[in-house]
Image (cartoon, grey):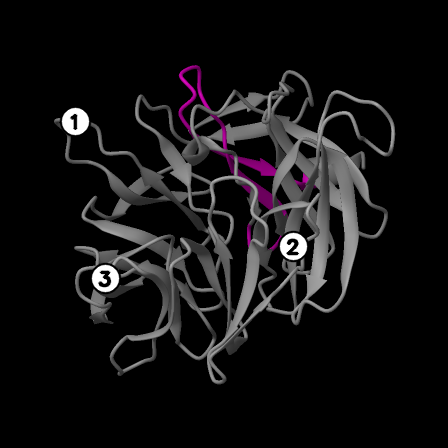
């Protein structure tokens, strides 16, 4: 671990990894920290000829790192409330990881011949859900209840992804139609009990919706609504507007919570008072990339950390809060564009907010 002062924002930042491989934080749609905020988790890329890839944890204060799973596991994600991680081995074997001592217990199997299309997610009841590419080449949603076999509850010929079970309602699973770009209707909600699918945010043809995430208590979701260059606040411009939209659990009411340039991945603090997002060059527009902090009460947005340019989507900054809400973990692409994990303490930001 090294500490450095951001040359543009002036804030002190801790950098925990240095490559040459990619070291990327967990995706922003799951918890990234242990329940006591002592550790955060990240994925280390497996380079050819090496056997050190997998999921690692880092001690926030000391910078000490330790491997949690090897590279045969994928889909690692941490529980919203319990100090447990969930991961898959050999594509279909599901394990629970005790994050206090990193011991692993197999808890079941996903359908044979398939693979997950994202990370595992869990509700407060222990039900696990994921989007899945089935052996029959359809896509589906799969649930696994404690002590029971996995069940395919929905199938589609669309490519499904970003599945996130509601943290406090095991009956609702959010998912998307993954086009790797815009979609006619991207966001969907599935009712497990009724086997009923409905759009979450109903899109108009001119809208581009992307990168959605549940709040930790499952009461609302944040998503990004992109506007094209040349139409910033109705005026000619050269950058893309990123509107962070907050919707209620049922998708019946939406508000614009923040507006800034070139935003992409939003996240909500557990107390709902703050948002963060990455600022990224995309759709032909180059900009100083970094992490933006937003106060929901005032909609004030401030660039708090700058980063290098991302080589791939896996190297995006994907910022997210710790559980206390006073630190943000983000990936900072190095000189080769490979993600390296960093933490910024927000107490220094709030002093001059």
- How far apart marks 2 and 3 lie (CA) works out to 33 Å
- Label for residue 38? none
Q: Residues within 10 Å of mark 3 (few under 14, many from 20)?
A: few
- How far apart marks 1 and 2 lie (CA) works out to 38 Å
Quarter of the figure that contains the N terminus: top left
Q: Position of residue 180 (x, y in %)?
A: 47, 40
Visible in this render: residue 101?
no
Query: Disc 1 marks which residue?
Result: 48
Query: Disc 3 marks which residue?
Result: 136
Residue 124's place in the image compared with 351, above or below, is below
Q: Position of residue 208 (x, y in %)?
A: 65, 43
- How far apart marks 1 and 3 lie (CA) works out to 32 Å
Residue 102's place in the image compared with 145, above or below, is above
Left or right position of 229 against 141? right
In the rendered structure, are the residues bearing label 1 and label 2 in contact, judged by CB atoms less than 8 Å apart?
no
What is the magenta range? 322-347
């Amino acid at each position: 671990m090294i500490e450095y002062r951001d040359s543009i924002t002036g804030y002190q930042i801790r950098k925990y990894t240095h490559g040459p491989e990619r070291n990327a934080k967990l995706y922003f749609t799951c918890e990234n920290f242990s329940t006591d905020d002592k550790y955060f988790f990240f994925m280390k890329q497996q380079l050819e000829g090496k056997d050190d890839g997998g999921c690692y944890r880092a001690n926030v204060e000391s910078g000490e790192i330790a491997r949690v799973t090897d590279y045969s596991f994928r889909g690692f994600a941490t529980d919203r409330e319990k100090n447990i991680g969930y991961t898959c081995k050999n594509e279909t074997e599901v394990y629970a990881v005790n994050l206090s001592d990193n011991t692993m217990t197999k808890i079941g199997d996903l359908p044979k011949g398939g693979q997950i299309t994202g990370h595992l997610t869990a509700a407060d009841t222990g039900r696990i859900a994921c989007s899945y590419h089935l052996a029959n080449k359809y896509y589906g949603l799969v649930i696994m209840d404690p002590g029971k076999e996995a069940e395919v509850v929905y199938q589609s010929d669309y490519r499904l992804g970003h599945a996130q079970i509601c943290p406090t309602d095991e009956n609702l699973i959010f998912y998307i139609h993954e086009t790797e770009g815009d979609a006619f209707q991207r966001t969907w909600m599935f009712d497990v009990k009724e086997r009923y699918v409905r759009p979450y945010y109903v899109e108009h043809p001119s809208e581009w919706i992307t990168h959605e995430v549940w709040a930790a208590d499952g009461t609302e979701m944040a998503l990004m609504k992109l506007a094209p260059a040349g139409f910033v606040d109705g005026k000619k411009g050269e950058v893309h507007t990123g509107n962070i939209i907050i919707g209620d659990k049922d998708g019946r009411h939406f508000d614009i919570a923040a507006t800034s340039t070139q935003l992409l991945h939003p996240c909500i603090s557990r107390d709902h008072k703050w948002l963060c997002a990455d600022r990224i060059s995309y759709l032909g527009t180059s900009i100083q990339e970094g992490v933006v902090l937003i106060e929901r009460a005032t909609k004030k947005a401030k660039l708090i950390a700058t980063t290098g340019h991302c080589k791939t989507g896996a190297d995006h900054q994907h910022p997210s809060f710790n559980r206390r809400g006073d630190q943000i973990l983000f990936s900072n692409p190095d000189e080769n564009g490979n993600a390296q994990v960093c933490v910024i303490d927000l107490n220094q930001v709030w002093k001059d907010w």
